[in-house]
Image: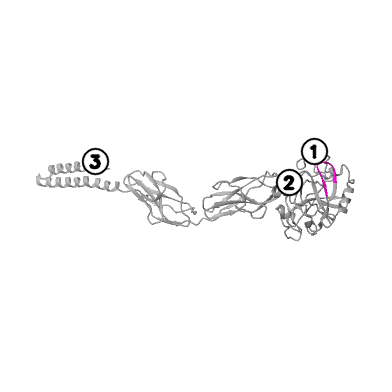
Amino acid sequence: MNLIILIELNETLIEKKRTFVRSDLHNEFNPKKIMKNLMKTLGIALFLLYLVPLINSCKRSCPPVLTTSAITDITPTSARSGGNITDDNGCDVIARGVCWATSENPEVTDNKTVDGQGTGTFESTLSPLTPGTHYYVRAYATNENGTGYGEPKEFSTGNVVLPTVTPAEITSITLNTAVSGGNITNNGGGEITAKGVCWSKSENPATADSKTENGTGSASFVSNLAGLCPNTKYYLRAYATNSAGTNYSNQVTFETISGIIFNPAITYGTVTDVEGNTYKTLQTGSQTWMAENLKTTKFNDGTNIPLVTGNTEWANLTTPGYCWYGNDECANKGVYGGLYNWYTVNTGKLCPTGWHVPSLDEWVAFINYLGGINAVTGGKLKETGTSHWTAPNTGATNESGFTALPGGIRRYEGTFDHNRNYGNWWFSTEFSDTDAWRWYMDYESNVYRTNHDNNYGFSIRCMKD
């Protein structure tokens, strides 16, 4: 630009010289006048030569000119803005972005983004921000002469809320394991610091119950459930945690498989007890029996049956009580059911409403229907295979569909015995003041009946009224 001005000045001086020559030719020669005009022209030229660099110097010392974009996509921990650089004032923009602070007129010494170089528009993500906080924002641009700022904007972040999560389908269910997971549909504006699934035998499981821990972040996740009990109903919820707390998905249910081998040729019915346990049932002549051992912990009026674990306490009972073989509910409840003393049977409230513990005469009628007490009747009653019965499980065909299982016993002194070897079931018929009738079978093919002390713990099969 200075070169253009000098060229223009040179042309002006040449024109002035021509004017002087013409003046000399046509007018009277006046040296004083000529000198005065020349000095005047030279003064103007010198002034212009000084002024132009001064103007350019003032312009070069200015930082870029820009505006700040509106604040959008505000979350509790982030937001978006940007800027538009409209003039670099003659020097290249070497840095640009937005800066923010909780006080007015933030500068590049505060929080900032770095979003490239050059003029034009740019976008910026402000992160991390503090939930529930008021912020001030300005776009900035820097050239060799300094940093310019756009007009200030301000906004407030919202508070972090609980995340939302949905459960995945429950698959690959076995005796003791299953697969589930979850999908976090909204992180609530905060970082997900924990996620997984939790499960329980009671409704609305929480992280204080059994759970998986599947890391952090908002990605979907797969959960492997282990340590489950066979033939047991579970309640499951996915969970996710952020700074606002832990939230749960809707509740879903599933049931582990029992591993019990029923007769596939039999069409079984079902019955449900007072606490929601469902049992297969079968029709045998005029009788309808449960095809599974009873596992309720409540009488049919909803009152609790006392759970008795200690040997001495069990031996001293003269009132109802029950237990799980070996005091191991998980391993035994779903397959073998509970062991009940005869005082529990004698209440008349042990089986579901409309059902009862069969009498000795009813049992005799059942056995006679199957051909009477002989070398093959036990085999007709027993589950096949050796998954639950000790080998050889002689003659087991389960022809009847009864699927008898070896739940073992609890002796009158409180010790446990014969799990997987013997199946024992109470009758409702008394033998004496201290004994009652029971029937049993072993891993061979026989079936027997005898009496035992009322303090023994045996399995129960209910019969429909």
Q: Earlier in the sequence, mark 2 or mark 3?
A: 3
Q: Residues within 10 Å of mark 3 (few under 14, many from 20)?
A: few
Image coords of residue 444 (percent x, y): 82, 41
Left/right placement of residue 395 relative to residue 137 reads right
Which dot marks residue 392?
Answer: 1
Q: Residues within 10 Å of mark 2 (few under 14, many from 20)?
A: some
Image coords of residue 144 (percent x, y): 32, 44
Image quadrant for the C terminus?
bottom right
Camera-side mark, 1 or 2? 1
Q: Earlier in the sequence, mark 1 or mark 2?
A: 2
Frontmost residue, 36 versus 123? 123
The Cα–Cα distance between marks 1 and 3, rounded to whole angstroms, is: 119 Å
Secondary element at tag 1: loop
The Cα–Cα distance between marks 1 and 2, rounded to whole angstroms, is: 21 Å
Q: Quadrant of residue 92?
A: top left
- Magenta range is 439-447
* Residue bearing the label numbered 3: 7
Do the residues under discs 2 and 3 have CB atoms within 8 angstroms? no
Image coords of residue 263 (percent x, y): 81, 44
Image quadrant for the N terminus?
top left
* Residue bearing the label numbered 2: 258
Secondary element at tag 2: loop
Frontmost residue, 71 versus 188? 188
Q: Earlier in the sequence, mark 1 or mark 3?
A: 3
Question: Quick check: is 145 in the magenta stretch?
Answer: no
Secondary element at tag 3: helix
